[in-house]
Amino acid sequence: MSLSSVFIIILALYLLPLIKFVLTVWRKLFFISLTKIPASSDLFKRNIIGSSNPKESKSNNLKFWRGLFRVATVEYILAPFRHYLIGLPVAFAFLVYSGLIIFNYTVMSWSLFGSFIGVIVLMLWTQFSRAQTNLKAAEFIRIYPQMHPDDFILRYRLDLAWGGMAILDKRGMTPINPESLDFTTDKRPIQSYFICAKILIDTMYFAHLCLFAYRKLGEQYVFEVFDGAASFWGKRILQLAKGHLKVMGLDKLNNLKGSFIYIFNHKSVFDFVLAFLALSTIKVNNRHVRIRFILAKDHFKDNPLVYKIFGIGKICEAVNMIFIARKNPKQSNLDLKKAAKFIYEKDIDVAIFPQGTRAKGKFNRSMKRRDAGYYTTIRKKDKNSPLSHIRKGSSHLIWDTLNDLYQRGVNENLNIVFIGINGTGNTLPKSNLKIQTNTDIEFSIGEIIQLNPGILNELFAPQEEAQNDPKRDFLDQTNLMINENLVEAMSLHPMLLQRYLTELKGQFRFENDKIAAIHDTIQEISPQSNVVFQLLDHIYSLPSNHWNGYLSQLSQLLLEKPSEERYLNLLEDVTSELLHLEAK
């Protein structure tokens, strides 16, 4: 293939930016813009984005704008890949070609030289134009964070592809309430890699949009933009996944004062994605919530794809999220102390997943997704610990925050907010890239524990008799508190019990008196121990062909009412099986 053919292909890929460049010059000369687009019409938005009744879209005007939007969507998808796969390699080739000319290894070809210059100028102008669109879009999100995703997508893509769009025009805005947000359809659920790909592209755009704002306008501005952008990102991802989000208990948080730590259970990447959206309407300390997660350094910073190319890690770092080195205990402690200081210094609210990783996804007997576990985030080295599914990092964070507030002389409460998440394991379970549509997701705000830094005086008050290490006792008690409150916020035990009793009646054909006896035994055991629910959670996280044997053994134990040791022995067997299968 000749060089001229290569440049023709490159020019074809840059055809839309070239058209945009010509249109921009034309509009500048003749003061023409795209602001006459009928954005105030909901019918127009439905038609242009393509989710309408064909009978509604017969006008030539709508067909014209729909065509522009479709081309804009192609540009939206193509642009970042074109820059990295074509633009930068062409710039590098030009440098090499220039070097060969300078050192007399080749003869100057003005046509080739001009082609290089033309493509590079077009590439640089395209990047500049994209940056300007991103800055306008960032301001749009800052001003209207509660808008419908379609309001933003319409304006952003048209301006990105064609220019001249009045992004800040607020006509036709449709505010939506994140407390109950429903994008589900009447079609049967599907599982799709394609939806995941669309989510990744949109995520990359939103991350780089915030990064542009950070580089150009500084940390304070991106602080204002990020929370709205993160909330809007959650809305857009939920829309692509055709999910239904319900948030319960928000009234418990409004107008609280003090410092805040939010503690979530962890089932899916969607826990992180939707947390910003779920809490976006809350006001604490006379401002909106500013969620800043403690993130796994190996996932978000050490991974160049997530950190740099998608830009997620970079923007998280820019807005003061903390990366924790999970495999380095000494560094982890320093990272947690840093997070504790940031709560007061940066006026942020820290969020953490105490399980340290996502729980294994579950399935029913028909191999359909059934959310994810909780007690299953265990490590082999401490599998026999009753709290092996909870890391002590959250307890250390609470301790470090209280200590930091105490050292500063701050006499205000530390609010520990427990939030139970259900349903995200259906949308996207661990170790899976297929998004399932039409799932119901719930964020339930549970108990709010308020601790005053003054309790440190009580913990370290002189004792007449020798006591255990006060800090260690505090960490142990806090870990128990975290577990109890997360279980309560998730309504985990009632759900496991209902599933188990349904299995006994339907699968095992137990008589009602036997089921009642088993139910009574569980009610007797549960105030002292969670072992039965740990067993059920572990069993249902195994492949379904393992269930009957273990469920039969558990049922027999519950009818016999033996000592707790027998339950623990069975739990050890099930846990070993679970770890063995995960290691494969």
Image: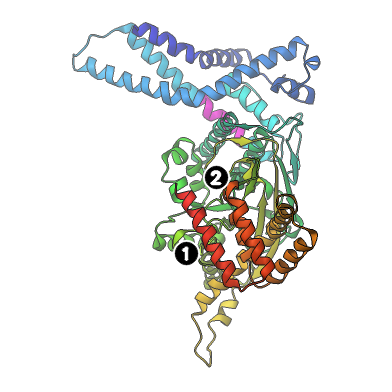
- N-terminal label among 1 and 2: 1
Where residue 426 sits in the image (x, y, percent)?
64, 43
- 131 vs 38, left or right, is left
Decide: few, some or many residues near mark 2? Use Cα within 10 Å; few <14, some 14-19, many ≥20. Answer: some
As displayed, is residue 180 above or below residue 450?
Answer: above
Decide: few, some or many residues near mark 1? Use Cα within 10 Å; few <14, some 14-19, many ≥20. Answer: few
The image quarter in which residue 213 lies:
top right
Q: How far apart are marks 1 and 2 (CA)?
A: 22 Å
Instruction: Give me the residue at 58% from left, 69% from top.
Output: 566
User: Residue flagged by tag 2: what amino acid is it?
Assistant: Lys
Quadrant including the N terminus: top left
Give the residues in magenta: 128-138
Q: Callout 2: helix, strand or loop?
A: loop
Q: Which of 24 and 298 is in front in this view?
A: 298
Can see residue 415?
no
Which residue is disc 2 drawn over?
A: 430
As displayed, is residue 440 above or below residue 160?
Answer: below
Q: Nearer the viewer, residue 198 or 454?
A: 198
- 516 vs 125, left or right, is right
Instruction: Give me the residue at 54% from left, 85% from top.
Output: 461
Instruction: Give me the residue at 69% from left, 40% from top.
Output: 439
User: Residue flagged by tag 1: what amino acid is it?
Assistant: Asp
Q: Which of 81 and 439 is in front in this view?
A: 439
Q: Residue most toward the bottom? A: 464
Where residue 454 sits in the image (x, y, percent)?
60, 77
Residue 137 painted magenta: yes
As displayed, is residue 507 above or below residue 529?
Answer: above
Where residue 552 sits in the image (x, y, percent)?
64, 58
Which residue is disc 1 drawn over?
A: 382
Q: Callout 1: helix, strand or loop?
A: helix
